[in-house]
Each structure stands twice: as structure tokens, then as C-alpha cells.
């Protein structure tokens, strides 16, 4: 006989709860309730409490009832809920995703995935069958293209509130201090989150304005996601915002750039060109003449200046917008 829908839904709910109960720290009923809601399980808080009480009676789950809200966690030696279909390769992928996407995924989503991340780490334990997968993170590296810098300190709670507001299209109340030290409170519409080197930037619109700004997350002193929802602007495109050089302090102005560079210093431009239409000419005098259509920005200027005397005769001419001739 087929199970009733409510019985199946209850079973799925219990499985999701077991997956989300962590080790080493406690999670509250309210936190689990929010995680399940984000995962599409619409249950009231009391239902979650009843299920947790049942699970703690039948599994190695500790309930800390010394103070409210109660906290739940797997006991130290408990096996927890294994994910049998998680292969060593999938476990490795999850481990790499946790490391490189931790700042680019909503905080509540990362927290809801803790059970999977923990299982992935356990799957890549001391078994000889997973030795090659365990070794892989030590064999690959994302390296800096400029002088490495330590990441700035982000105020506690800021990333979580920013990512939640961005995820749910909610207005965000911030207390922001700019590079000059001027501090102001504002309501902003979060539109995108970008990582540039060690820094995170929030792309947003200030209330009452229709232009975008990039705010460094480490300069946001406080942030709180509002309950007010906004309609995301259909004309905004984060990819285009980046292509226009806005993260490089540009305004989207495209120019036809021409300069001469010593061949030894510029040979890498023959392998990694500035643009698809780049042209390079070797006149046989030890110099390369480079021509390319690029976005004019402060970052481009810093890049050119970084070559010092090995770059000369720099010329810029306004180019037609993309898609036009």
C-alpha cells in the first residue's frame, strides 16, 4: 500500500532535520526552522520542536535544555546521518565548494549545507580508498596576480545580513564609513555581491537613486535586512556592470588603446591579450606596438603605470559602444 502523502512528507522532514543537526556546536529550533523554510519545507515552529524531541529519543542526538532556546547536536561518537551516494569525487567537490564559495553564497544556505560538508569531510577521512581525493587540495592552488594582501575584517553579522537581503530582494539598512572616514546611515537596494582579491563588494542602489554604487563590505559597520521587499530592476546586469569596468573604478567608457611596450615586458600580451580585437606588431626594434579596445578605468591606468619606463607612447581614442560600429 502506498504511503499517505503526509506520512511521506513527515519522513522527508525528519531526514532533512537529521542532515542539518551539526556536530561540535548546537543549533536551535528557530535556526533549523529557518533553514527548512529556505529549503521549501513550510512547517510551523511547534512542528519542528515535536520532530526534534522525537529524533532525540531515537538517535544519538543531545538536547541541551538547560536554557531556552534549546540546542541540539549529534553526540561526539555518533555516526549521524550518512549520505551513502556521496562518492569520494563528490565529497572532494563539496569540500572545494565550501572553501571557495563561502563568501559568495547566502549565509543561511551555507549553514543549511553544514551536514553535507561534514559528511564530505568524514568521507575523505583516513580510508586508503580516498587517499588520492584527500591529496588533491594540496595539488591545486588559486594564486594572486598582484601583491597578496590579507583580507580586511568584516564586522560580525554584516555578511550574513547582506547576503540574506540580497538573496530575498529585501531593502538593507546600513551604517557605512567611507575611505575618507565619513560615516552615514542609509537604506540600500542590494543587487550583487562580488569578490575582488581579498575584498568583498556590495553592488547596490541608495534609496531615491537609480544609479549603482559599489560598497566595500569591510566598511559597513552595521547592517540589517529589512522586511520590506523590492522589485529587482530588470535593466540591471551584474555581468555588464563588471564588463563596464565598474569594479575597476570605470564608468563603462570603451576606448581604442594604443601603446608601445618593451618586448621582454610585453611578451605575455601575445599569450593573454587585452581583448579579442587586440593587434600586436613587432617592428624589430625590441618594442611591441599593442592596439586593443578596452574599458577606460583607474585600474587600466594603474596597470599601465606598473610597467614604468617599459611602456611609452600611450594613446586613447573613444571607441563605439559594444554592438555598434
Image (cartoon, grey):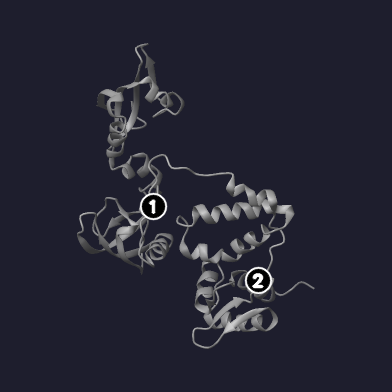
Q: Which mark is residue 150?
A: 1
* Front-most of residues 115 and 232: 115
Characterize the local packing of mark 1: few (<14), some (14-19) or many (20 or more) Cα atoms within 10 angstroms. Answer: few
- Which of the 4 image quarters holds residue 308? top left
Depth check, front residue: 156 or 264: 264
Residue 188 image point, x, y percent:
30, 60
Q: Position of residue 181 (x, y in %)?
A: 21, 58
**Mark 1 touches mark 2? (CB < 8 Å):** no
Q: Residue furthest right?
A: 1
The answer to whether residue 278 of the structure is visible from this angle is no
Which element is circle 1 on? Answer: loop
- The N terminus - image quarter: bottom right
Q: Residue at x 67, y 84 (%)?
A: 57
Q: Is residue 4 left or right of residue 218?
A: right
Nearest to the observer: residue 9 or residue 266? 266
Location of mark 2 (residue): 15
Residue depicted at x 38% and y 40%: 146
For image coordinates 27% across by 25% down, the residue present is 309
Query: How far across and how far down the image is residue 283, in percent?
Result: 36, 12
- Quadrant hosting residue 152: bottom left
User: CA separation, marks 1 and 2?
Assistant: 40 Å
Residue 178 appears in the picture as rendered = yes
Q: Residue at x 34, y 28 (%)?
A: 293
Q: Earlier in the sequence, mark 1 or mark 2?
A: 2
Q: Nearer the viewer, mark 1 or mark 2?
A: 1
Relative to residue 221, is residue 137 depicted above or below? above
Question: In the figure, 289 relative to 115: above or below?
Answer: above
Q: Which mark is residue 13?
A: none
**Does dot 2 land on a helix, a strand or a loop?**
helix
Q: Is residue 99 above or below residue 15?
A: above
Residue that extends furthest to the top in the rendered view of this protein? 284
Residue 10: percent from the left, percent from the top?
A: 65, 75
Amino acid at each position: 500500500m502506498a504511503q499517505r502523502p503526509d506520512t511521506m512528507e513527515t519522513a522527508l522532514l525528519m531526514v532533512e532535520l537529521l542532515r542539518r543537526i551539526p556536530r561540535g556546536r548546537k543549533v536551535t529550533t528557530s535556526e533549523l526552522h529557518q533553514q527548512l523554510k529556505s529549503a521549501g519545507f513550510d512547517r510551523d515552529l511547534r512542528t519542528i520542536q515535536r520532530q526534534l524531541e522525537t529524533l532525540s529519543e531515537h538517535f544519538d542526538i543531545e538536547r541541551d535544555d538547560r536554557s531556552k532556546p534549546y540546542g541540539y547536536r549529534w553526540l561526539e561518537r555518533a555516526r549521524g546521518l550518512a549520505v551513502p551516494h556521496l562518492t569520494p569525487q563528490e565529497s572532494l567537490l563539496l569540500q572545494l565548494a565550501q572553501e571557495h564559495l563561502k563568501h559568495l553564497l547566502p549565509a543561511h544556505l551555507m549553514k543549511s549545507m553544514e551536514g553535507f560538508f561534514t559528511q564530505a569531510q568524514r568521507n575523505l577521512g583516513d580510508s586508503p580508498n580516498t587517499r588520492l581525493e584527500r591529496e588533491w587540495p594540496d595539488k591545486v592552488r588559486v594564486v594572486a596576480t598582484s601583491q597578496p594582501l590579507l583580507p580586511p575584517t568584516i564586522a560580525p553579522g554584516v555578511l550574513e545580513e547582506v547576503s540574506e537581503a540580497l538573496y530575498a530582494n529585501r531593502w538593507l539598512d546600513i551604517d557605512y564609513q567611507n575611505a575618507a572616514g565619513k560615516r552615514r546611515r542609509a537604506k540600500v537596494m542590494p543587487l550583487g555581491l562580488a569578490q575582488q582579491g581579498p575584498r568583498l563588494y556590495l553592488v547596490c542602489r541608495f534609496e531615491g537613486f537609480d544609479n549603482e554604487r559599489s560598497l566595500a563590505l569591510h566598511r559597513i559597520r552595521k547592517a540589517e535586512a529589512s522586511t520590506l521587499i523590492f522589485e529587482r530592476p530588470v535593466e540591471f546586469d551584474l555581468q555588464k556592470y563588471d564588463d563596464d569596468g565598474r569594479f575597476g573604478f570605470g564608468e563603462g567608457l570603451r576606448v581604442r588603446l594604443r601603446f608601445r611596450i618593451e618586448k621582454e615586458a610585453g611578451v605575455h600580451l601575445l599569450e593573454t591579450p587585452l581583448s579579442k580585437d587586440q593587434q600586436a606588431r613587432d617592428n624589430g626594434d625590441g618594442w611591441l606596438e599593442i592596439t586593443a579596445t578596452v574599458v577606460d578605468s583607474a585600474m587600466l591606468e594603474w596597470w599601465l603605470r606598473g610597467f614604468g619606463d617599459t611602456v611609452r607612447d600611450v594613446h586613447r581614442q573613444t571607441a563605439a559602444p559594444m554592438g555598434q560600429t
